[in-house]
Structures are given as structure tokens and as C-alpha cells.
Image: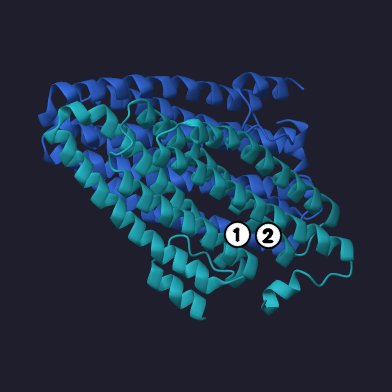
Chain colours: A blue, B cyan
Amino acid sequence: MNSTQDAHFDHISQQFNVELDDIRTQLMNMGGMIEQQLQDAMQSLKKGDSSSAYAAIKMDDDINKLEMSINDQCARIIARRQPAASDLRFIIAISKAITDLERTGDEIKRVAANIIKLVEEGATEISASEIRNIAKSVSGMISDSLTAFARYDVELAYAVVKRDEEVDEEYKTAMRALVTRMMEEPRSIATSMNVIWILRSLERVGDHAQNIAQHLVYLVKGIDVSHATAEEMQATIDK
Amino acid sequence: MNSTQDAHFDHISQQFNVELDDIRTQLMNMGGMIEQQLQDAMQSLKKGDSSSAYAAIKMDDDINKLEMSINDQCARIIARRQPAASDLRFIIAISKAITDLERTGDEIKRVAANIIKLVEEGATEISASEIRNIAKSVSGMISDSLTAFARYDVELAYAVVKRDEEVDEEYKTAMRALVTRMMEEPRSIATSMNVIWILRSLERVGDHAQNIAQHLVYLVKGIDVSHATAEEMQATIDK
């Protein structure tokens, strides 16, 4: 814990501390649901059985509800406490992070729906290793971006941003292979398109994890790094 | 102007009114840049000349800078004014709207890059009418969502959400036609993929316009309609 983090938990009102701590805990819960949702979708790909992918789709409702509930909580705290600037920055960073998590849930829902199509066509082997690799990477990114939030760890946030560059490369390579495949086997086009949408959504999940990491850097450093290169971001962190 | 809007411009400090008015004006400016950017990208498709699409890509930098500058301005107002809950809701709604506009700019940049590829391949006729139709729809949605913001017009915000449903249908129809085309003419696959990415990005632009409309409804009505159906949203507006 560094001084910035401590500052959020040093209010005269003990109750206010509890409230701020609670929204951070809820953010972590929401992150846990997202990780479970992605794991469920991937389980279907592995087993060739669509039931857990359906569970992943259904979970999106709960994730949406949790997002609305946390947002409500943030709004109530702001209305009641009229928080000082640093607390407000904390609340706004949480609020932005849950927006990204909610959109992550939407992307994973799309992934699950496309995996169901692959299962129905008995085509789960197509590009399964590429899908699994990228899914593993972005799942780690989500997890790390939230750990960074929990620990005010800007170095870990930087690692998430760096990792997104690798994911983008993996994604491009997989995409080129798929287009080549479609040209060589036109009969595979419909199935290949499903795989393309899956990869595209997973790549977006990585982007959202990167956004969450950037919200944390803004919270801790007060500098907007959303358009910074990895090097510029490192320079900001070292300040 | 309704009472909610008036409330934002009735502060003892005249200077505070000016500051709030200014961030709204900047939001409108950012919207104007986005509309220009999309128009430039479409111009290249129409003329078969990539120069204005390059201009659209370059414009993304200016849009990003404007986003950061408005966000800074919002942060400074919050720090200095310690605004009351209703003003804060206004500032947060603006801040969320510019995040959506910034991501819209990213999507249009992708559209422009793919249009350049079509121009280079001399393939601008492929699906040009579908691209133009969807571009026209989503450009109108962006414009209307900002007008809704300027006028606190929840009915217009609702119309934007309804229109997004139509765009989603247009998009699905165009996508099915493209997949069929790829199967019939495997040689067209690489080009068709460019068109698919263009349509996908335009569909996302529509989603962002819908988000902006929903931020406005939240600002005016205090109810989160981001997961509401069009009918539920209408019920909220009628309250």
C-alpha cells in the first residue's frame, strides 16, 4: 500500500471508509464473474458441449445488474458525501473500470454464442489452439488489471499494457491464417467467420483490460495515459 | 430548455456557469470533428481516391487530444468547485459521452484504413451502397445523440436507440450477403473481409451513439437505461 491508497482510507467518518472499500470489493467481484464467464465459454470449446457456453451467456445478465448496482452505489456516495477531489477520482476510476468490465462481459457473451455455433457444427477443432491461447492471455490481463487496482500497482498496470501489444500480434497472425484458410477451402468460410468473430471479441477483451489498467494509472498518477505508447506510459510511471 | 437544464445554469458564481457551458460546447465541437472524419472517409469511397481517408486517420490524433483536454477540464472543475450532486452528474455524463466519442473516432479510423485498402485494390464498388447506407444512418445517430445532449431532449435520445435496432438489422443483412459472396467467389475473400471490417466498425459507431443517448437519459431522468429495451426506455422517459 502506498500513500495514495492510504489516503482513501483515512477519513474521519469510519463509515465513509467502509463505503469506499465496499465499491472496490464489488469491482473485484465483478472481475471474478467475468473470469468465470470466460472460463465457462472456453470449457464448451474444450468439451464440445454447449451447456457451459449457455451459462456464460446467461451470466451476462448478472454482470449487467452488478454494474448498475455499483454505479448506483457510486452515485449515492457522491450525493451523500460530497467527496473531496481525491476520493472523487477514486470513485470515478471505479466507475470507468466497471463500464469496461461490463463491455468485456458483452464481448464474452458474443464469444460464447459463436462457440455454441462451432459446437453445433462439430467444428470445435478449427483454430482451437489459437482461441485458447488468446483467451488465456486476455484472461490473465483482466485478472492483472484488477490486481493492479487492488494494490495500486502501476508497474503491474504497465505490464498489462505491454501484454496487449503481444495479444494484438497473436490476433493478427491468427487472422491472416484464417483468411488464407478461407481462400483455400471456401467450404470452411461460414465456420471460419465464427472463429474470426471469437478472436475479434477476445482481442477486444484485451483492449478493455488495457483500459482498466490505464484508469488505475490515472487514479494513482493523475496523468491520462490512454493514448500513450508503452514507453510514454513507463516514463509517466517513473515520475 | 426544461427545468433540469436550467438548474445547471443557475449558480451564484457566473464563472461556474460559463465553465459548465464551455465543456458542453467542447463536447459539441468533438462531435463535429467526428462527423467530419466520417464524411472524409466516405468521400474516399465515393471518389476512389484515398487522400481524404488519410485525412480522416490523421484527424484521430486531434480528436484524442480534444478528449484529453475536455477530461482535464472536467477534473479541474471538480477539484476547484466541489460541485453539488446535480452538477457532478452533468460533468460525469459529459465525461462518459466524450469517452464514447473518442472510441467512435477509433472506429472511423479503422473504417478509413480499410477504405484505403479498397481504393488501392480498385474495389470501391463492392458493397459501396451498403456501406454508404449504414454510414449515413450512424452519422445521423451521432448527430442526433449530441443534439439530444444540447437540448436535454430525451425523446430524441429514445429515437437514437430505436434507430440502432434498424442499423443492427441492416448490418446483419449486409453481413449475410457478404458471406454468401465469399462462398461463391473465393477470390473476393480478402476484399470482402475489408468490407466486413468497415461494416462492423460502422455498426459499433451506432452502438456508441446509442450509449451517448443513454448517458443523456441518465442525466435527465437519473435512471440507468443502458440495459433497457427500447420499450423499457420509453416507459422511463414517460415517467
User: The numbered mark 2 sits on a residue in which chain?
Assistant: A
Q: Residue at x 35, y 43 (%)?
A: B199
Where A134 falls versus B226 (above or below)?
Answer: above
Q: How many marks?
A: 2
Question: Taking A152 as reference, is B191 left or right?
Answer: left
Q: Residue at x 25, y 45 (%)?
A: B175
Q: CA distance from mark 2 to mark 1?
A: 6 Å
Tag 1: amino acid: Gln
Residue A19's label in the rendered image is none
Give the percent coordinates (x, y) of residue B67: 66, 43
Q: Is residue A193 visible?
A: yes
Q: Are marks 2 and 1 in contact (CB under 8 Å)?
A: yes
The subunit carrying tag 1 is A
Q: Nearer the viewer, residue A129 or A187?
A: A187
Residue A80 is left or right of residue B177, and the answer is right
Q: Which mark is residue A77?
A: 2
Q: Nearer the viewer, residue A69 or B179?
A: B179
Residue lying farthest bottom? B239
Which quadrant of the structure image shows residue B218? bottom right
Q: Quadrant of the N terminus of chain B?
A: bottom right
Residue at disc 2, secondary structure: helix
Q: Residues within 10 Å of mark 1 (few under 14, many from 20)?
A: some
User: Relative to residue B229, is residue B199 depicted above or below?
Assistant: above
Q: Nearer the viewer, residue A66 or B92?
A: B92
Residue beneath disc 1: A73
Q: Nearer the viewer, residue A89 or A173?
A: A173
